[in-house]
């Protein structure tokens, strides 16, 4: 691709300008600004002036010793785990079934369309819909449970801490397992078919093939699903905010709802909210880093080490040869 | 003998799988069925039996109550449409432009710039909300739709996707022959490259549109004037006290926000599912 005469290189720069500008203005600057606010006294509706605290880490100290913030971190983690464990198990199970050639499940397209559907519906709408479904004393869920004789009388689900957390986690699960499943199926379809053929010839059962061929090959995609789900889960806002306003008794108060409440209600503590955001930023960064480290391709690392050792050995022999 | 047994076993497991799949498919649909049916029933009927599969005849009454208060679906629809369309156009056009710049030209910072985009991809941007709000407040851009549209210009994930697409499909010979015919670089991009990218742009456009349509956090923070409310903000009003006892209207309001998404989804579901699958296989 050697072009003579006119150089077109400058267009590479020109075509990148909009991206770079938008990134600097709308992403980098707000991140830097949030960081700065985290060290200042900026609070109060409509305030924009600020000065740094003499005790520069004051907001961070206050946030980290705020029991409600700590509770919100616990809630966020808890709700994410209660949603993610069943989500990944169901998604893997459905993936195993849908890609099993012996089972040969028909109508997969229609099933995928149905199972993925909740994912595209506005989360705000779903939160309020579930608030109505679990209504007390006369919501549809209570109606069914009482009619079936499972409950003696209507139960106020959204007033029970664990029931409320469970409902938030269920909504997350229900909105996202279809997405996870489609991604995993795509991952399985991307695996070299000769691996499955070899397993079949070796007489592996469906379960053996799944655990020894499919799962190890899906490692990168599982990492992708885990990290994206975790970052999404740590930023969970719409559903806990609108299902039950973080209640009862802060049981569904996630860290994003906490940050929102700090900054945009009560005494408009932008500085405290910014500090809490930065704490979240650090938590997300650390968790992603740890996950990447755990899920890194161990075989590749091993192979690299072996290669290095081999090269070293070669050099040694070469040197010895030269010395001789 | 063994073969027969395994056929029986296979039939049994197949039946179990179908039952489970049908169960989850119904679970996806069930809340929305209740919602649509209850939107036609009166509050009294819902209080008697909250679940019914038979629509009633109170649709118009519910609609009057719904619209008689602060919920205005037309304003929400208009604002959400402006934001989602604007953001989708910005994101698809400029991501294609950046991707083309990365792919078609040999420039010194090409590789560093690509590495930079991959780094930006990892930044959890949601945590920058406070700074973004303060910045917009100082600019006087609250109650303005632009801060919800313009940031879409820098979408690293889409640049990555478009670059992969271009690498796989675009032959630079076409670009060269356009040059020989005297076409400028921008003309070539707009008239030759963009049309070739339509399949990739369409896939990405659907997701960007739906994503922006469903956004709650930033619009809720920035838009305080009820003329500027988006659909999700309108929905959040249904949670308020003024609709507390109007069950039928609440269901109708929810249905009004779901219906457009249902139409888009069931018309384009094939492409949407394919697009989701594509998004995951980027290694």
Image: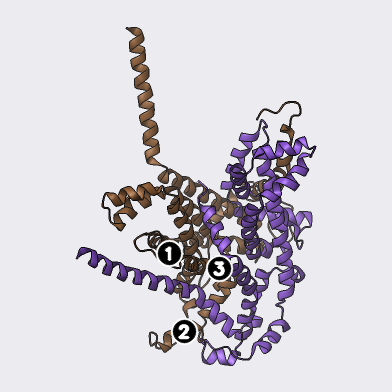
Q: State the hue of chain B.
A: purple
Question: Mark on residue A142?
Answer: 2
Q: Are marks 2 and 1 on the same chain?
A: yes
Residue B12, picture quadrant? bottom left
Q: Chain of mark 3?
A: A
Total marks placed: 3
Q: Residue shown at 71%/75% (left/top)?
A: B73
Residue B232 position within the rendered picture, expressed as x and y whole percent measured from the top left = 65, 69
The reply to whether dot 2 and dot 1 touch (C-beta < 8 Å) is no
**In the rendered structure, the residue with mark 2 lies on which chain?**
A
How many angstroms separate mark 2 from mark 1 (CA)? Answer: 23 Å
Coloration of the structure image: by chain
Q: Classify residue A190 as left or right of residue B221.
A: left
> Label 1: chain?
A
Near-viewer residue (A148 or A137) = A148
Please tell me which residue is depicted at 73% across the width and 84% down the height of the picture: B68
Circle 3 sits on which residue?
A239
Q: Which chain is brown?
A: A
Q: Position of residue B231 (x, y in %)?
A: 68, 70
> Could you tell me which secondary element the residue under label 2 belongs to?
helix
Q: Which residue is mark 1?
A: A82
Question: Where's residue B77, x and y in %?
Answer: 71, 70
Question: Mark 3 vs mark 2: which is more N-terminal?
Answer: 2
> Which residue is found at the position 34% from the left and 21% from the top?
A313
Q: Are marks 3 and 1 on the same chain?
A: yes
| Element type where label 3 sits in the image | helix
First in sequence: mark 2 vs mark 1: 1
């Amino acid at each position: 691709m050697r072009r003579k005469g006119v150089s077109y290189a400058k267009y590479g720069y020109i075509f990148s300008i909009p991206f770079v500008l938008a990134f600097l203005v709308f992403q980098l600057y707000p991140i830097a600004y949030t960081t700065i606010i985290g060290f200042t006294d900026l609070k109060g509706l409509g305030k924009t002036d600020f000065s740094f605290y003499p005790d520069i880490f004051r907001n961070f100290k206050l946030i980290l010793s705020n029991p409600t913030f700590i509770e919100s971190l616990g809630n966020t983690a808890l709700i994410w785990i209660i949603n993610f464990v069943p989500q990944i198990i169901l998604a893997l199970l459905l993936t195993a079934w849908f890609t099993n050639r012996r089972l040969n499940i028909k109508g997969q397209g229609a099933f995928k369309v149905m199972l993925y559907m909740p994912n595209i519906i506005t989360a705000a709408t779903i939160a309020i819909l579930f608030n109505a479904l679990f209504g007390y004393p006369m919501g549809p869920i209570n109606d069914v449970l009482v009619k079936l004789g499972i409950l003696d009388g209507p139960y106020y689900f959204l007033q029970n801490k664990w029931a409320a957390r469970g409902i938030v986690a269920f909504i997350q699960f229900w909105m996202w397992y279809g997405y996870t499943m489609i991604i995993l199926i795509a991952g399985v379809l991307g695996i070299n078919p000769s691996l499955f053929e070899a397993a079949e010839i070796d007489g592996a059962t469906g379960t053996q093939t799944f655990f020894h061929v499919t799962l190890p090959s899906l490692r990168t995609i599982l990492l992708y699903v885990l990290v994206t789900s975790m970052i999404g889960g740590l930023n969970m806002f719409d559903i806990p905010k609108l299902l039950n306003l973080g209640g009862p008794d802060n049981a569904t108060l996630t860290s994003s709802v906490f940050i929102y409440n700090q900054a945009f209600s009560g005494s408009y503590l932008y500085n405290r909210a910014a500090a809490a955001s930065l704490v979240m930023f650090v938590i997300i960064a650390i968790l992603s880093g740890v996950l990447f480290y755990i899920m890194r391709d161990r075989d590749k690392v091993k192979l690299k080490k072996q290669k290095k050792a081999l090269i070293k050995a070669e050099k040694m022999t070469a040197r010895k040869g030269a010395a001789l | 003998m063994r073969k027969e047994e395994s056929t029986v076993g296979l039939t049994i497991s197949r039946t179990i799988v179908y039952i489970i799949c049908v169960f989850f498919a119904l679970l996806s649909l069930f809340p929305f069925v209740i919602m649509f049916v209850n939107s036609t029933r009166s509050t009294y009927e819902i209080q008697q039996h909250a679940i019914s599969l038979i629509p009633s005849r109170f649709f118009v009454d519910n609609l009057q109550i719904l619209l008689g208060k602060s919920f205005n679906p037309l304003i929400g629809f208009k604002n959400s449409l402006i934001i989602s369309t604007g953001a989708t156009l910005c994101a698809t056009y400029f991501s294609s432009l950046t991707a083309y710049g990365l792919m078609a030209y040999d420039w010194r910072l090409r590789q560093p710039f690509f590495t930079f985009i991959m780094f930006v991809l990892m930044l959890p941007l949601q945590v920058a909300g406070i700074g973004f709000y303060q910045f917009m407040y100082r600019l006087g851009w609250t109650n303005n739709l632009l801060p919800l549209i313009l940031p879409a210009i820098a979408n690293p994930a889409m640049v990555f996707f478009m670059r992969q697409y271009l690498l796989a499909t675009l032959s630079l010979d076409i670009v060269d022959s356009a040059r020989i015919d005297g076409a400028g670089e921008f003309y070539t991009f707009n008239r030759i490259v963009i049309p070739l990218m339509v399949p990739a742009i369409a896939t990405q456009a659907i997701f960007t549109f739906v994503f922006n349509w469903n956004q709650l956090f930033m619009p809720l923070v920035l838009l305080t004037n009820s003329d500027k409310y988006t659909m999700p903000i309108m929905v959040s009003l249904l949670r308020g006290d003024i609709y507390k006892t109007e069950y039928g209207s609440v269901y109708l309001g929810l249905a009004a926000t779901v219906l457009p998404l249902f139409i888009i989804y069931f018309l384009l579901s094939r492409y949407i599912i394919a697009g989701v699958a594509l998004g995951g296989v980027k290694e």
